[in-house]
Image: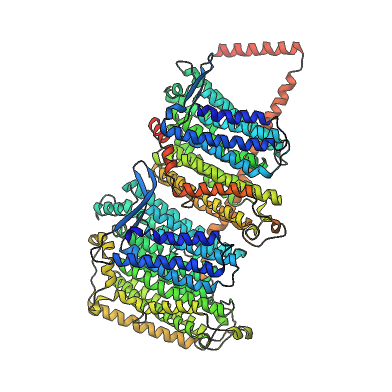
Amino acid sequence: MLTVLLILIPLVTGLLAFGLKGSGPKVLGLISSLASLAVVAGALFQFRAAPETLHVTASWIPQLGAQFNVGLDGMGVMLCLLTAIAFLLVFITIYNRNYENPGSFYGLMLLTQAGLVGVFTAYDALLFYVFWELALIPVYFLCSMWGGEKRVPVTFKFFVYTFTGSLLMLVGIIYLYLQSPDRSFSYTTFTNLNLPVQEQSWLFWLLFVAFAIKMPIFPFHTWQPDTYEQSPTPVTMILSGVMVKMGLFGVIRWLLPVLPQGAFMWADVVMVLAVTGIIYASCIAIVQQDFKRLIAYSSIAHIGLMCAAIFANNEQSLQGIQIQMFNHGINIIGLWIVVEIIQSRLQVKNMDQLGGIAQYAPRMSIFLVIIALANIALPLTNGFVGEFLMFSGLFQYNIWLMAVAGLGIILAAVYTLNMLQKVIFGEGNALTATTTDLQNSELLALSLVVIVILVLGVYPKPMLDLVGSTTEIVNKVF
Amino acid sequence: MINLVWLVPVLPLLGFLINGLGRRYLSKSQVGIVGSGVILAAFAVSVMIFLEVRQPGFSTQVVTLFDFISVGSLHIPFAFQVDQLSALFLLIITGVGSLIHIYSTSYMHDESNEGFARYFAYLNLFVFSMLLLVLGANYVLMFIGWEGVGLCSYLLIGFWFKNTSFNKAAKKAFVMNRIGDLGFLMGIFGMVVMFKSVTFSEVFSKTAGLGAHSNYSVQIAIIATLLFIGAMGKSAQIPLYTWLPDAMAGPTPVSALIHAATMVTAGIYMVARSNVLYTLAPQIQTVVAVIGLATALLAAFIALAQNDIKKVLAYSTVSQLGYMFLALGVGAYTAAVFHVMTHAFFKALLFLGSGSVIHAMGGEQDIRKMGGLKKFMPVTNWTFLVGCLAISGIPGFSGFFSKDEILAHTFADNKIMYILALAGALMTAFYMFRLYYITFCGSFRGTHEQEHHLHESPAAVTIPLVILAVLSIVGGYVGLPEVFGVKHWLAEYLSPIFAPSAPFAEAHHLEHSMEWLLMGISSILVIVFIFLARSKYIRYENTGREATGLTKVLENKWYVDELYDAVIVKPLGMLSRFFRDGLEKAGIDRLVNGVGRGVTWGSQQARRLQNGQVGFYVFAMVIGIIVLFVIGLLL
């Protein structure tokens, strides 16, 4: 029941928000996200006590054999927790901002949340596909209506990319459905298909391209920097913090268990792409002047490592990637919050025009330093444990691949410290001298981020335990 | 007491939190008391721990706090290991650390209240990380401290963050350390694969169990190499040493604590800790010795021609670290740790002395513009002289005993290396006394205003100097060589740490007469070189002429920075710009946009087909059927 509630809360409040005006949608958004967080907390306890009660099956489209089949495993609970925290952080951060047409803005945001939770809970392939689209479509509207100057062509590019992926995935799902003996979309049916290797081989690409675009990994990534740059920052936070996890989640939940031999066959190719992406994106991040694009490329590099870790497929790499999904989400949202604050104060995102902010806004600068360090996986921040386990897993798969991927650690230090130097250190200028320090809502949001960073950095055990069961399952079938 | 070992790192952490969070509300004296007080308290606890550890029959104790990472068969607890090695390092870190904190309360007094608190917060955080590094009971915890000290070093080098060149120095230090860290990390992964554990006790017992001629010698050598790459970064060895001289951009007490006494010796600690791995990989041990010796000589050459008081000391540090690796490389683990200790005393003394000089000179660091400071600052002068005598290895001073032990072991191992190492020691004596005579003797060469302001530093500065000077003299007596007919206390104390590797080490034996001879030769030559420096520099005049020939090359540090810039930094920038402008924009993105435009164009064409004429539709349908029919026939 909690699982259904988790989808229903944002869905209903989202639809309600469309009808509200003034500060109504804001307040509703905040209440809704708090309610979601409370339900996730309940689910967390439920998961420890009686995980099977989180599964709900109801009739949906009986003619097709599609069921409303939702449930939560360890990874699912974790990603729903991430989603709930992410939306709460976003709504707190933008509480003092005013968006045109707030009813639609908050409505679309909440619908996205419903779609995301649906993706993370669906145990029916058709339902998964429907939620996948439900999560994406509001984002197109958000980008094209509230985005930057170049929003129209950029949204179009984003749309073409993701829509292509979705179509391929739909074809793949239908094909799998047609192979199923009992004409069903259910997860258990799909995982028991045991298709011949030849079929698994090409089906792999149908599904993988959809997930690869969403992550995104090299060379399917060029929509991302543009979209991150042009979207309104709250949307970027959701896109980079939570939505990219849809792709990674899709691979772990669906692709590996359904097409294990296909995945095994192509693992090397995917790993080479992913590792190439780490170096490629890190290098580009070094020579970015735009704050938002720098974070975008940094994210591509990090996702590359996470993708490689999935396909290394051993206990350590799988544990690492899963907790990194959560930690990467928290950290990158923290970075975007700082970007949003700077941009709303100074209307500038070119880092060459910034500098010296540490003198004028010391609190914000301290937060930026901590989050940036978590983003480069400094020990005792949340980023370290995941990266350590992923690299360790990668090392076991192939030392040389790990060594190349490891160069990303060094490059990450280069672009992150460049960024800190350009933005907060050095002498100030007439523009940055006007920077005011954090408002209360911003302070609250950033404090929450830093608390998560430090707590999970020092004591990651609960999170590792949570996702342990999922690791076991994936490790067994693959 | 051992169970309270967690107090040692927690106290500085507490100081960091109080000073960091209270930076707007605390006065300077409160900040100073908290900052120095926590380190003194940690020192007190360390002393009590040490007194327990030095008892005969003490066996290693591990204090586990909680489970850090636990995945499958891999368990990494958050645990501290108290043994002879970590107890000794605790004393050095908190002891020298306390003195430097007290010194800083005076040295940093011109900072704003917030800056002062920020400084002490960083310094406390550094001590916390350094203590984690030496207390960790496994390599992951060591790595946590390892990167933590790197971060604090970054924050403190760039402490005056408005200055862009200081920021660059800080960045360089962090990035170069990260190169080493990647090696360290891979070494850890190697252990995970090979031993399924990263805990010291398990790794060492399993390694020793494998023995000298096992099938796993290659794997052990790989792990030892990877760990050593980490040590190269942290302890500034060729090729990763160029960050350390630049790190002098930080406040001088920071240079004393981090870039001389403690952090940079982390690499020596790591190799000494892993002595079993290295003893079982003799080829890698040779590599360690060669790199250490090469670094010692290269840096000593550069130090001969530097004119910045802190740069001379920085290259001297690089050079002395090289000696410590040489010791590790020839299997003289005790000598290496011994030299870490004596070096911590005299190098901290020299740096703090230089800080006193720099303060008196109003921020001037160029020794060509100093001179004759002896009469203005007697305490600084005398303590600095003690430091110079100690580092040069004058008999009776601490540096003599530790350096002599390294040289003797090198002689037993390889005669050529011994001659080179001795040459380096003579250069050390020369450049240190060049520094001393130019700075403290002769006549004053600065401005009138500077001369007017010259004064001895206050007690918070001079008391630590005096204490360190005393330690620089007596610190050597914990390791009197056996030819004196006494027991080498330190060797006996540390023997449990190096016991596991003892069965595999080659035994070198040196005749007592030979040892006396070596000692005599090096002592006489050192004194000769000090007099050479005296005759050349005691009446130094600043001619202002540009250096030429070899001196110019040395002044420019062998042009290694320029080389790295041309070979690594510039190509990386070019590659990155090619990725950004070439591949990304003109390649992948254009392709994707092309496909997008193609789709748009295609759909516009397709729309024209729907022109509303029924006749055209029928025609198209017929064509379609014929095509399908033909395809059917062909298949």
Query: Would you identify the image quadrant in which residue B164 lies?
Result: bottom right
Reply above or below: B211 against A203.
below
Looking at the image, what colour scheme do you see? Answer: rainbow
Which quarter shows the N terminus of chain B?
bottom left
In the rendered view, does A304 fall on the left or right side of B192? Answer: right
Which residue occupies 48% across, 16% down? A183
Query: Can I make out residue B625 in this image?
Result: yes
Relative to the observer, which residue lies in front, A272 or A1?
A1
In the rendered view, does A28 fall on the left or right side of B288? Answer: right
Residue B357 place in picture, x, y as percent: 53, 79
Query: Would you identify the image quadrant in which residue A395 lies?
Result: top left
Residue B441 place in picture, x, y as percent: 50, 87
In the rendered view, does A371 fall on the left or right side of B626? Answer: left
Which quarter shows the C terminus of chain B?
top right
Query: Can I make out residue B325 in this image?
Result: no
Reply above or below: B44 against B434.
above
Residue A242 place in picture, x, y as percent: 56, 38
How many marks do you count on the picture? 0
Residue A301 place in picture, x, y as percent: 54, 45
